[in-house]
Image (tube, helix red, strand yellow):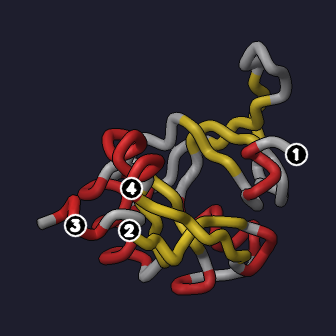
Amino acid sequence: MTWRDLFDMVIVSARKPEFFQMSHPLYEVVTDDGLMRPSFKACSGGLYSGGSAQMVEKSLGVHGDEILYVGDHIFIDVSQSKVHLRWRTTLICRELEDDVSYNFICCGFVWSHGCVFFGCVLPLHPESFT
């Protein structure tokens, strides 16, 4: 299992924040070297470049809070996807990786459509936050 197996669809070079409000050409990434071909419809399990949020909703047949969007930028990824589309959001914050691995226990749980993410973050040493 790889990290891509955790998601219904992976999109790179999305041109955010335009991705959430405008439509751009969609390309399927077909090789590990990044070779792409034009695509007119995204399929579950695919790796794509470009496109739009509306295309994601149409291709997966879901919308609004039925989608869990994972991003690493608090304003563009989390705020914009929530404001414009009402998507559920998860923020990845690499800067806290060392703190989390040292101070917290993460209990995994499964989200719909086979996406796995972590919740139940519990401090191991609560006194370290005082």
Relative depth, front residue between 3 and 33: 3
Which residue sits at x=64%, y=63%?
56
| Above or below: residue 61 compared with residue 74 | below
**Residue 126 in the figure: left or right of residue 14:** left
Find disc 4 in the rendering and name its residue: 103
| Residue 2 image point, x, y percent | 81, 42
Mark 3 neighbour density, 10 Å: few (under 14) some (14–19) many (20 or more):
few
Disc nearer the start of the sequence (3/4): 4
Disc nearer the start of the sequence (2/1): 1
Find disc 2 in the rendering and name its residue: 123
Q: Amino acid at mark 1?
A: Met
Which residue sits at x=76%, y=61%?
8
Provide the secondary structure element on which disc 4 rests.
helix
Find disc 3 in the rendering and name its residue: 127
Disc nearer the start of the sequence (4/2): 4
Find disc 1 in the rendering and name its residue: 1
How far apart are labels 3 and 4 at the CA level? 10 Å
Provide the secondary structure element on which disc 2 rests.
strand
